[in-house]
Image (cartoon, helix red, strand yellow):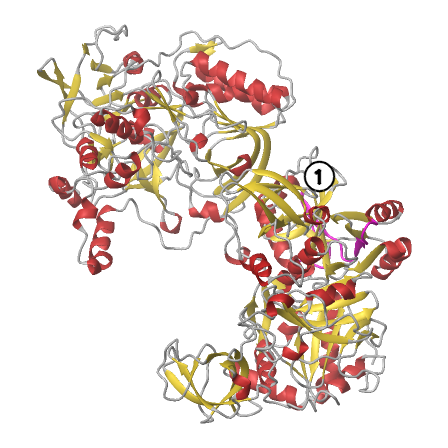
Amino acid sequence: MTAYRLTSGGLVDRGANLDFKFDGKTLTGLSGDTLASALLANDRLLVGRSFKYHRPRGIVTAGASEPNALVTIGKGASTDPNTKATVAELYAGLDARSQNRWPSLKYDFGAVNGLLSPFLGAGFYYKTFMWPAAFWEKVYEPIIRRAAGLGRVVLERDPEAYEKCWAHCDLLVVGSGPTGLMAALVAGRAGLRVILADEDFRLGGSLLAETTRIDGVSAQAFAEASLAELRSLPNVTIMPRTTVFGWYDDNVFGAVERVQKHVAMPQAKLPVERLWRIAAKRALLATGAEERPLVFGGNDKPGVMMAGAMRTYANRFGVAAGRSVAIFSNGSAGYQAAHDLAAQGVEIAAIIDSRSDVADVAPAGVRLIQSGSVIDTQGRQRVSGIVVERSGFEETIACDAIGMSGGWNPVIHLACQRGAKAVWSPELQTFLAPDVGNGLVVAGSAAGRYTLVGCLADGAQKAAAIAADLGFSAPAEAMPVVEEDIDPSFTALWYSPGAKAKAFIDFQNDVHVRDIGLALREGFGHVEHAKRYTTNGMATDQGKLSGINATGLLAAMQGISPADVGTTTFRPFYTPVTLGALAGTSRDEHAAPVRKSPLHGWAQKNGAVFVDSGLWYRPAYFARSGEKTWRESTDREVRNVRENVGLCDVSTLGKIEIFGPDAAEFLNRIYCNAFLKLPVGKARYGLMLREDGMVYDDGTTSRLSSEHFFMTTTTALAGGVMSHMEYCAQVLWPDLRVRFCSSTDQWAQMAIAGPKARLVVQALVEDDISDAAFPFLAAGIVALKGGLKARLFRISFSGELAYELAVPAGSGEAVADAIMEEGRAHGICAYGLEALNVLRMEKGHVTHAEFDGRVTPDDAGFGRMVSAQKPDFIGKRLSTRYGLTAADRMQMVGLKPVEADQHIRAGAHLLREGAKPSTLNDQGYVSSACFSPTLGHDIALAFLKSGRERYGERIVVWDKLAGADVVAEVCNPVFVDPGNAKLNV
Amino acid sequence: MTMPYISRHPLENRLPLEPGIRAVDHMDVPRGTAIATVMAMDGEDAAVAAGLAVAGDMSLRFVAPGEWLAVSQSDTPEGLCRNLSLLLAETASVFDQSDGRVVLRLSGPNVRRILAKGIGIDLHPAVFEIGTSSNVLCGHISINLARTGENEFELIVMRSFAESLFDDLRLMGREFDLSADFSAQG
Amino acid sequence: MASLIHCPHCGVRPKEEFSIRGDASLVRPDPEASDEAWHDYVHIRSNPRGRYREHWQHVAGCRRWLVVERDTFTHEVFSVTDGAATAREAGR
């Protein structure tokens, strides 16, 4: 075969040569070409190898259904495998490589699979690679993957930018052929907000390849004029290079726009692809129809192409697929291709028509063989002839390309993505979309109205109906006049009988007729089973060409109607979507927001090493010069807080302002302990339960005035507690007069802890904060020297004399700086999360390491806090149920290793000495553990069966992960200052 | 010890202290905006709304039924809260959020397209009209969005998220060379 | 990819703005109610195919708890109402 560029015609710019590379060789195409049309113009027909047998394969289509011409485009990290050459827009410098061949496209070792093909039939993988099981992962799969893979994923970081965007419209029109253009025009003129999207870089759809005249001008000129009008309408948005790939709930459509896939050097400020979510009041599917391949012997040889694709290459791209073309057709479309090619000077070797007695007329001088069947093709890497059978006689006809035309399949993919089953039309011999409701209407060829007149009228009518439905008035308009319309008639032919070579159904996955028969015989005849068993329709094209023929064959082999076989399930995406587009900008620092404390700058100045804590960045520790490990810094910080004073940022705690006459009552119901009588000016530790009686969260709540409380929650559950409170206030007790809002971001809050804390704080605060004036658990508004109003709380997580000071967030850094300045004489240090954690463990204070959802207040030693007097609170009723009050529940205890230099790790389990590790023997677990600089050895908090009765007992801390068994002594969980002498000073 | 505590804006690390060159699409960051949460007590929604409607010198942003953000460029945080408390007396609770919220103003012919990269609601002026405001998700971050003009929007974000939102908006606006600086008027 | 919920206070919003709690028909029992009543309320959930009323919170919007009535099979949403109003009507 020799494909070549025609001397004239086509929508390519013959003055604009574009150099590109294919498998390292530099070739030249024209502006307006796809990679496929440019390859054809250069007579490069062999573009890939098939998946299983590595058979040579050529370009089959001129669009998105292409099964063969998958290439890898780009270099380095910007490489895109599995790009369809038939839709890839040509640009200068495009660098494409063929796939699935080794060492080269022409000489491929994998082709030996073709010789083994009798053993590689349907279900081959399932039958062959069964055992030994261990072989699958290590031997079989790697080999299959290397031999089979379609393209290679590039593991480098993708340097390109992607983004996502929302769009809203009254009407989304998918497809810009005659139907879509007409619908967009009618809706646009009526004033609807219209989006017209098309996957092609040039809009016009099938009009770009038609030779007829519409309204007195060429179809291309008609399309251009229509588009010009649409562009002039401010309410119409035209989106070329945009594939609408999915239809989702509530009429939201997913689409991907290839913004810069057609340029050699993408602009940095633009994404290469943009993922659109289009919320459309209505949508009109004008996706046209796909020409159906014919299943005949040797139909996979390079040079066998859809007849319609040949028309497109000739009429749109000015490229002839061959010098001598044979047409094999079961309908009028094949004759149309023959006429168009002949008009361009291409020789038509013959038309073979499977029908008899047809009215279609072959071009002058062209031989027509009716009731014919193509049973084989000749040639090795490209077609050199066909073997035709008629009435028992075989004949070989020389040709260098074969155009096949098997009828039409409406492209109904989107309409069937949400569960609707395609419906067989006996009249049209194809599947149509059923009525899928108001949101999405199918029109034109996609609805089986294949003629141009039908498309134009259907698009206009359906758009007008949508406009009226949405309250717009669309004036009746005269339809454009089509001079010579197309004839879409055909007689379905699922299999051309008498094949002398493999007759392929799925070109990409090498599924041929016998595979379907085998699947049927072996009990996999259901269309979904047959797909999996044979891999028909499983590849990147998802059966766009092969699905219908598989259904037809399954029906024919069983003597039933295709209606009874049905189609496989349509699912998004219509065509593959890159992971980059799906991720959009959500990568690196944009993958999740970072929350920064108002004291972030202060922490940085003081040498903080930050750690992710939910979305927050929090200082883990403050490294000083000479300190080599986090432990050294942490130990110093802990000692300094115990001996002098430290400052810790606690701004990330959840903070909630609670107002209203029923605020106290509300708190009384959401905490398990009493809040009704909390005096103004006092803070109280509060424990919140879940309704099942387990601890949910804890924190302090202070009463700032009779109807104003200030609650703090843990950092981790700030959002959860807020939602929980909103649920309680809105749904459970809507009549309580309480309102609240988050003030987490309003306050910079710092803990100043240590024996010298008062000295430091008093230096900044006007008010008297002596123990007499501001005792433990005091809370109130104070004035800082200079006038700034602040909130001061005498609460302690560390067990030391401590204050928490809250100032408006903007002033936080300056106040923290002032505290550090003032505290320098007292040896102040900044301390981070690690030190905070050690300090609280030494004091036996709990966090969510202890409150893991399985712990009751009593388990954690708070049993007496739970109010028995309150009539109701969240969690009250189920706290009393059997099991939550059992005597052998695990209770929180302290642990210290018997050998002081041994280590305990959180997560370890507790066993009696001598007991074998088993679930039955499990006595409990370690929830938190650390090295205590104050005590000089490890300490741990743990939950142990009946633990509070077992102080002094020796227990084995069993840590399989660390491979260590440590004997520890059970003790009171408060390791430091159990009498609270340090708090009340 | 007496210290004048300097108030810091969370975007000081992101923006020059002096105004720069403005592109047609611009993000303007006012420094001193007074913002307060106003929460009507049960059954007082209409009374509070009526009271707020006549309050001068501030804009109202809808948060939820019976809840608004009151925003003032001219008042101080204390002044705004005091005025609101006097005006609304027993009918509403008022809480100062001036330090906890950050205001970003976007203006220009392409801001709708910029915002559509993060915001899922229809920003067509016939749908989201001038004067409308609402809490909405912008990318991963919840904000209050108000339309202050045909091509002008005001975003209010929690302080801790301000840098992330700012970075996201810069990325969204990159296509249109979105510029940003602190408001000249301080 | 997307679905849209019509918040009665904020208008049409993508589902990402919401969080879902579950069955909205549950009524918190009286504190003195039986073990069975409380067990049912806290632990037992039906998982119906078809119409279902759920509590959703518009967390990124007005933060109101809403009652969303939808079809768990088709995802069709029939109504969205404010949870407090619904609770008041039910006399909770």
Q: How many marks?
A: 1
Span highlighted in magenta in the image: B15-44
- Snapshot quadrant of residue A768: bottom right
Mark 1 chain? B
From the viewer's perspective, is residue B175 above or below residue A830? above
Q: Amino acid at mark 1?
A: Asn
Q: Position of residue A494 (x, y in %)?
A: 24, 23
In the depicted structure, whether residue A199 falls above or below residue A721: above
Q: Which quarter shows the C terminus of chain A? A: bottom right
Image coords of residue B114 (percent x, y):
62, 43
Q: Farthest left residue?
A: A393
Residue B146 visible to an observer of this rendering: no
A284 or B21: nearer the eye?
A: A284
Disc 1 is placed on an element classified as: loop
Residue drawn at point x = 85 percent, y = 80 percent: A767
- Screen quadrant of the N terminus of chain A: top left
| Left or right of A775 in this view: A226 | left
Q: Nearer the viewer, residue A965 or C36?
A: C36
Q: Nearer the viewer, residue A146 or C74?
A: C74
Could you tell me if residue A216 is visible in this image? yes
Q: Position of residue C57 (x, y in %)?
A: 63, 51
Pointer 1 local density, CA inside 10 Å: few below 14, some 14–19, many at least 20 = some
Left or right of A812: which side holds A689?
Answer: left
Q: Residue furthest front?
A: C34
Per the image, the residue denoted by label 1 is B151
Q: Position of residue A738 (x, y in %)?
A: 77, 59
Question: What secondary structure characterizes most of the magenta part?
Answer: loop
Question: Residue A267 in magenta?
Answer: no
> Residue extending furthest right?
B86
Q: Would you place residue A185 above or below residue A298 in this image?
A: above
Residue B42 located within the stretch drawn in magenta:
yes
